[in-house]
Image: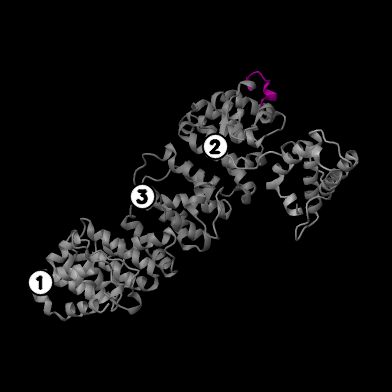
Amino acid sequence: MTESVFWNPHHQRDLLLVVKERWRDLSPVAKTELERKLLKGPPHWSGDDEESSERRAHSTLNRIHWLKQQGYEFAFDFDVESPRLKSLASKWQPAYALDSAASIEGTVGWVRTETSYSELLDEPLSNVVEKARILSGRTASHLIENDPFAGLASHKPVRALSALTSESKRNNYPEWAWTTFLTSPGRKSDKPKFCALVAERLASLPETILHSLLHPATEWLLAVNENLSPSFPDQLDHVWNSLILALRYDADSAKSSVGRIKGERDWPTEALNAPAGRLANLLITDPSAKNLKGGQGLPSLWINRAEQLLSLSPDLRNHAITIFAHYVRWLFWVDPSWTNKNLLSVFESDGDEQNAIWAGFAWGLQQAPSNELYIRLKPHLLKRIRQSIRIADHVGEMLSVLLLIGWIRVEENTRARLVSSEEVREAVLIVGEDIRLHILWHLQQFLSGDEDPQGIEVVNFFSEAWPRQKRVKSPRISARLCDLATVNSEAFPIIVDAILPFLAPIDSEQHIDFGVNDSKGEIVKRYPEKSLSLLFAILPDIASAWPFGIEAVLDQIASEAPSLLKDRRLIELRRRWNRR
C-alpha cells in the first residue's frame, strides 16, 4: 500500500480488521514493514505547521494501542514508543483507541432527548446540578441525548430552582443549567407566584452572570410577563432593572443571536432575537399598555422603561427602535407627543438608526398610517426614495406602497393629494426599475379591488403622475402594464388608452396572459380594437420572441371584428408572424 492509502481514515477499519485476522500468518518481513509504517506515521501535508507532529502521533497511537488491545506483541519496544508519541500528542487519551476500527459511515435517525430525572431526586440539593452534568450527553448509540436537568426543570421546577440557588450560595452559576431552566417549555405555565420567585433569583445574580444569561432571561421574561406583571409588579421591576444593568455591562456580547448575512442587516430578525428587542416587545404586549385610548398618553412607567432601552448603546438601541417602529402607528395614536420626540425624530438620522427604523416600519406593514402620521413622515419618505433603496429589502417594497397611498389619499380640508403628482413623477424617475414595477403592481391591486372599479383614478395616475421619459420604458414595465390593463374588463378600454404612450416592445423573457379561452379571451371578444392597439405596441419585430398563443389572439381579433382585417396594424403583425 502507498502511504496515502495506508493512512486514509476511510480505509482504517478494513485495514485493522484484516491485520487482526492475518497477523499470525504474516511473514517477519511483512510484520517489520507494517511496524515501520505505523511508527513513521502519516505523510506530511503541504503547508504543515507545528501541529503536524501532534496529528501524526495521534494517528499512530490510535492504531498501535488498538492492536495492543487485541493482544499483539510488537517487535519494537511498545513501552518506549508509546510515551515518546504521547509527548508529541499531549491531549491524546487511551480511550481514543477504542473506536479505531469502528465504522465511520453515516447513520440515519432522529436524535431523541431522554429527560428522565429520577436519579436527581435523591441527591442532596448541593449535588443535583453536578450530577445532572455528569449524566448528560450522548449515549453510545449517538441517537439518544441525555438531559436529566431538562426533565427536572420541566416537572420539578421548584427542586430545579432550589438546586440552582444552592449553587449560587457557593458562587457557582452554571450557565448551561440556568439556560435549561429558563427556556424549559414548562416555564410558560408557571403560576404567577413562582414566576415572581424566579424573577427575584435572577435579579439577585451578579451583573456579570446575568449578562451571560441575557438571551434566556429575556426570552423567559417575555414569555411569562402577562402572568408576572399584574400580580407582582415589584418583582418585575427588580428583574427589569437588573437586566438593563446587564445590557449596559458589555454591549458587544449583548447583541442579537442572529447575525447578519453578507453584510446585510435584517433588523426585524435581529431585534426579535436580541435581548433589547425582546424587552421592547414585552413593553408593547404589557398588560399596562392594553385598552389605551387615542390621545390618552402612555403610562409613565412604560415611558421610563422605553427610554431606558432607547438610551442603550447603538446596536441595542436600534433593536428597540426596530420593535417600536413596527408599532409606530399605534404609539402615535396613543401618545403623539412622545412618539414624535422619541421615534419619529429617528427618521431624520443616518446610518444604522435610520435603516433600523425604516425596517421596523416596513416590517409586516398591514395598515397604512393615518393622514396625520403620513404627513409627518412624508419628507422622510421622499428623502428615503431619493436614496434609491433596492427592492431587495422590504423597505423598498413598502416605499412603493406608501408612495401610491400618498397619491391616492387627499387632505380632508384642501382635498389636495398627500403626495402630489409632481412628487410621484420625480420619485419614479429616481428609483430603480424594481420599485417602479412594485408601484404598478400595487396600482393593479387597487384597480382590481372596489376602490376604483371604473379605473378613473388609474387613468388619472398615468395622465398626471407617471413620467414619460424613455428611461422609464422597458420590456418589464410593458409586461406589467399589460397585466394591469387586463385585470379589470370594464376598465380595459380607458386603461389601454392611458398606458399606450408608456409602452415599449417586450422581449422573450416577458410573459403576458392574453389567453383566448379564459377571462382575458373575454376581453378580446368585447374590445378587439383596443386589444389590437395593445398588442401592436408591445409585440417585438421578431415573432419568435412573442408570448405563446398570440397567433390565436390575432385570429380571434379578426373573427370578432372583420373590419380590422384591413387595419395596417393587424396586417403588419400577421406579416411578422408569417416570416418567423
Decide which of 158, 311 is in the foreground and name it.
158
Residue sitting at x 49%, y 31%? 188
- The amino acid marked with disc number 3 is Trp
Residue sitting at x 13%, y 65%? 525
Q: Would you call the spot at circle 1 few (<14 residues within 10 Å), some (14-19), or many (20 or more)? A: some
Decide which of 230, 423 is in the foreground and name it.
423
Can you give x and y, in whole percent of width and height, for residue 340 in the image? 42, 55
Q: For this view, does 87 lie left or right of residue 332? A: right
Decide which of 438, 202 is in the foreground and name it.
438
The image shows residue 216, relative to residue 380, as above or below, that is above
**Numbered disc total:** 3
Name the residue tied to disc 3: 333
Q: Can residue 354 be seen in this view?
A: yes
Name the residue tied to disc 1: 561
Is residue 123 rendered magenta in the image? Answer: yes
Q: Distance between the residues labelled 2 and 1?
A: 67 Å
Name the residue tied to disc 2: 109
The image shows residue 276, relative to residue 263, as above or below, that is above
Image marks 2 and 3: residues in contact by CB distance under 8 Å: no
Sequence order check: which comes first, mark 1 or mark 3? 3
Question: Which image quadrant is residue 543 in?
Answer: bottom left
- The amino acid marked with disc number 2 is Gly
Q: Distance between the residues labelled 1 and 3?
A: 57 Å
Is residue 262 rendered magenta in the image? Answer: no
Can you give x and y, in whole percent of width and height, for residue 159 in the image? 60, 23
Question: Which image quadrant is residue 84 in?
Answer: top right
Question: Which image quadrant is residue 14 in?
Answer: top right
Can you give x and y, in whole percent of width and height, for residue 5 in the image? 72, 52
Residue sitting at x 46%, y 56%? 357
Query: Where does the magenta region start and end?
Result: 120-128
